[in-house]
Amino acid sequence: MKEITEIFKSFENSERNNDVYNVLLKKIPFWTYIRPTVLNQVVKKNNLGEGNKSSFKFKLDKLIKTTLIGIRDLIRINRITKIDYLFFESSRRISDKEPYCSQFYEIIEKDKYMKLCYSERWSYDEEILYLNFFKGIFYFISIIMSPFSFLTFKQCDVQRIKNTISDIQEDLRIPLKRKYFELLFWYFFFTYLIKKSKPAKVFFVSNTFFIPLIAVCEKYNVETMEIQHGVISTYSVNYNFSNLNRKYFFADNLLLLGSSWLFVNSFIPSGSKTIVIGNNILSKQFSAQSKKSHILFISQKIIRKYLIKFIVTNCDILKNELILFKLHPREFPDVKTIQEDLSGLSLNRLNIITNEKSLDELLIDSKLNIGCYSMALIEGVQMNIPTIVINSPLSKVIDFLVFDKLQYVSYNDKLSELPISLSSENALKPDYFSSSNIKALEQIVRI
C-alpha cells in the first residue's frame, strides 16, 4: 500500500519529467488547478481512503432555493459599484461567527467590504453573496462544453497533462476537459466581479477553488490574502510548490493562525509572504472550562474507514465511554451508511454528530481526541487534550506535530487502556493558534 510520502514523490518526479507547469490557461499553470483532484483519485485508486468528494445529493427544495438565491445574488453583483474589500468566507461558524474573516470585519467599516461564500452546508445568510448557484451552473455547462475543448485546448498540452497523470498512476479518470472549462468560467465570472467591485484587497479561505480569482486579481493589480483554515504540510499538494513563483495561482500573502506554522516558508511558492495574524475566536475557546465528558472521534470521508476499524478493534475498552463521532460536512449525507457500519457493536453511548453541535463545542469537553490528520486534532493539541493519531497512509500529513500527549497507533492495535490520564502541562507550548495580532491586522487592511 502506498504512503503519502511515496505518492508525493511520484507527483514531483512526473511533474518535472513532463514540464507540466508550463501548460498555461489565462497565464494560470493549469496543473495547479487539477493537482488536488489527481491526488484524490490516487487515494481512491490505492484504497487509501474513500476520496474527498462531497456526498451531497440535490433535493428539489434545495435546488429551488439555491436557484432563487443565485438569481438574487446575480442581481446584487450587477448593482455593485465600489467595494474596498472582498471576503470569501468559510461556512464554519463559532457562536454564529465565521471564525476566519470576522476579526477583519471588526476593524473595517461595514460599507467597505462584501461577504461571499461557497457553502458545503447549502444554507444561506441574507448578508452573504453565495457561489453555490454559479458553481452548479458552471459544472453542468462545462460537461456540455467538454467535447469542444479541442477548439481552444491544444492537444499537445492535453497529452502532456495525460502523460503526467499516467506517470503518477495508471488508469485514473480525471475530467480534464470539464476542469478546463470550469476554470475558464470561474475566470470570466471573477473578472466581471473584480471589474464591477474594483477592490483593493481580496481575502479568501482555502485556495485551489480560488486560483481563477487569484489570476484575475494579478491581472488587475489587486492584492490577495489567503487566510489559513486547515492543515498545511509538506505533503499538501495545494501548497507545496517550492520550485515555482506564486504568480497567477497563489496568494500574495498567506495569513497564518500561529507562529508554529512558519515552517511552511520552506515549500510554499516564492513571492508569497507569510504573516502570523493569530485568531482570538479560535484561541479563546482553548481557555474555556472543560467538563472532560467524552471521547471525540474526528472523521473525514477520506479516512473514515480507519476510525471505524479502530472502534471495532477496541470495542471492549470503549463500550462504557461516551463516544461522539463527529462527521465532516461532506459526510453528512452518509449518516445512514455510518450507522450501519457501527451497528451491532456493544457500545452503550455512541452518538454520530452532524451539525447538532459545533466542532468547537465538542472539543472543549473532550477528554481524548482520535483521528488521522484533521486540523481539529491540532486544535485539540493546542487545548492540551490527549490525542491518538491512527496511522493511515495519509497520517504523515501531520508528521510535523510534536506533543507530549500524542500517541500514534494502528487501527488494529488493541489498547489495554486509553491515554486519558496523562498529566503535566504540555512543556512544548505549541503556537498553532495564537491571539489576534491587532497590529498585523491593521497593517494588512491598510490601503
Image: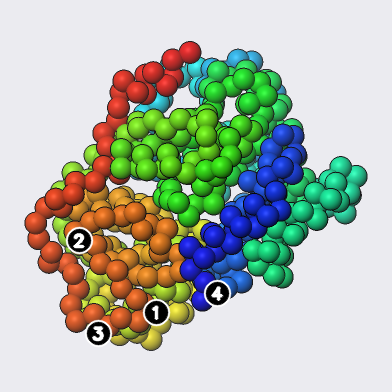
Q: Are marks 4 and 3 in contact (CB under 8 Å)?
A: no
Give the distance between the C-alpha atoms of the residues marked 4 and 3, in whole angstroms: 28 Å
**Residue ID for mark 1:** 309
Relative to 372, residue 47 above or below: below
Q: Which corner quadrant of the image does residue 199 belong to? A: top right
Number of the label disc, if any, that sits on residue 316: 3
Number of the label disc, if any, that sits on residue 405: 2
Q: Amino acid at mark 3?
A: Asp
**Residue ID for mark 4:** 47
Residue at the location (11% across, 53% down)?
A: 425
Callout 2: SS = loop
Residue at the location (9% across, 60% down)?
A: 423
- Residue 52 seen in render: no
Give the distance between the C-alpha atoms of the residues marked 2 and 4, in whole angstroms: 30 Å
Question: Is residue 349 found left or right of 301 in the rendered image?
Answer: left
Question: Where in the figure is residue 106, as x and y percent of width and height?
Answer: 36, 23
